[in-house]
Amino acid sequence: MLAIVNTPNGTAPVEIRELPAPAPAPNEALVEVRAFALNRGELRLMQVRPEGWQPGQDISGVVLKAAANGSGPPAGTRVVALADNAGWAQRARSRRTAWRPSPTMSALKKRRHCRSRG
């Protein structure tokens, strides 16, 4: 899996590297990351974190593997989630308390249409 890692002493502040896929804990789902957010806090942390640290907290994607304890969404569910770190990657782990189902675009358009009529 490809992931962005911190390289504070390198020629660039980050590198894309091939890393093993994360192994989720029993209460974590494995998410195929389709998008992630860059935020100022993580960009600042890159200046002080060690070589190899993996940034990334705010992610969205599709659950590849449900939490083993059954607490999370089933495989195939679109989610927005919070990862403890390592979200700037192709795969990330997310705890049950840190995800929400992600609406489809058609659902978002329908909501927008309904609000504009009211």
Image: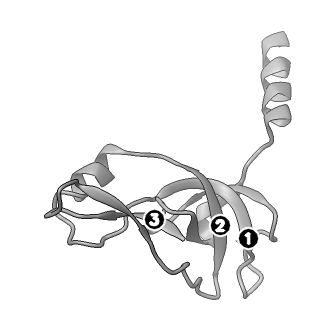
Residue highlighted by disc 1:
64
Which amino acid is tagged 3? Ala
x, y percentage for residue 54?
A: 37, 67
Q: CA distance from mark 2 to mark 3?
A: 14 Å
* Residue type for callout 2: Val
Tell me which numbered mark, 1 or 2, is placed earlier along the sequence: 2
Quadrant where the image shows the C terminus: top right
- Left or right, residue 44 beside residue 85: left
Q: Nearer the viewer, mark 1 or mark 3?
A: 3
Check the image and tell me how it is coloured. one colour
Residue type (three-letter) at the residue carrying disc 1: Leu
Q: Disc 3 marks which residue?
A: 3
Q: Marks 1/2: CA distance?
A: 5 Å
Helix, strand, or loop for circle 3? strand
Q: Is residue 59 visible?
A: yes
Number of numbered discs visible in the structure rendering: 3
The residue drawn where x is 58% and y is 64% is: 98
Extreme residue in the top direction: 117
Dot 1: within a 10 Å radius of its alpha carbon, few (fewer than 14), some, or many (20 or more) residues?
some
Disc 1 vs disc 2: Cβ atoms closer than 8 Å?
A: yes
Q: Residue 14: x percent and y percent?
A: 29, 57
Residue located 22% across and 72% down the image: 51
Q: Residue at x 71, y 80 (%)?
A: 67
Residue at 22%, 53% (x, y): give it.
12
Q: Which mark is residue 31?
A: 2
Residue 13 location in percent, x, y?
23, 55
In this view, the residue in front, 38 or 71, is: 38
Q: Nearer the viewer, residue 22 or 93?
A: 22
Q: Residues within 10 Å of mark 2 (few under 14, many from 20)?
A: many
Secondary structure beneath label 2:
strand
Badge nearest the viewer, 2 or 3: 3
